[in-house]
Image: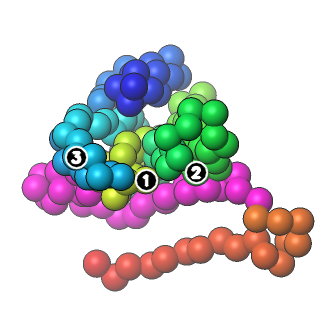
Amino acid sequence: NHRVVAMKIRHRFIMMGYPDAIIDSFLINKTYLGISYQQWQYNVIASIQGKIYPDSVCIIGGHYDDNLKTGNAFSVVPGANDNSSGVAAALEIARVMKKNNYSPANTIEFIAFGSEEVGLYGSFAYSGMAKQNSKKIKLMLNNDMIAYQPGNNQSEWIVNIMDYDN
């Protein structure tokens, strides 16, 4: 049902005013719990064109897949934390920017990545395409588990910022 979910996310972007939102498909091969799979997966991408540096891209994203390890459809799976909270943030930022006619200097891409829980396949597919097309990625804000509350002790709450030179 990943395509159904991707289509719903794309539809949400379109309803917010991003008519050029796309579904970018990629094929994965994965062995999980002793079973080999080959299936199509999907990233959903919407964007606001930059006015000064349209070829320089800032990414705001999260992933929409989850991982049910038990095989029991009635098991508790923390999908709202990991990671529909990240997709919700990307959607809300996109909505607010569109509502306020935000005009960025750089192009902004809002991406809902698929197939991240089983091996970061969505982000690898996107980054491979970006490299092939010589896309100039300025930064990536990856909203992962932003609604997760590890405990009542706020000293346990962390924000992890990773800076990569390349």
Q: Say what amino acid the circle numbered 2 marks.
A: Asp
Q: Is residue 6 left or right of residue 67?
A: left
Proximity of marks 1 and 2: CB atoms separated by less than 8 Å: yes
Residue 145 pos. (x, y %): 61, 56
For the record, the magenta segment spans 123-149
Amino acid type of disc 3? Ser
Which residue carries the number 1 mark? Answer: 117
Q: Secondary structure at mark 3?
A: strand
Nearer-N-terminus badge (1/2)? 2
Q: Secondary structure at mark 1?
A: loop
Number of other residues with Cα within 10 Å of mark 2, as a class: few under 14, some 14 to 19, many 20 or more: many
- x, y (%) of residue 114? 37, 42
Determine the CA span between mark 1 and mark 2: 9 Å
Name the residue tied to disc 2: 82
Residue 139 has which mark? none
Viewer-side residue, 96 vs 131:
131
Q: Is residue 126 magenta?
A: yes
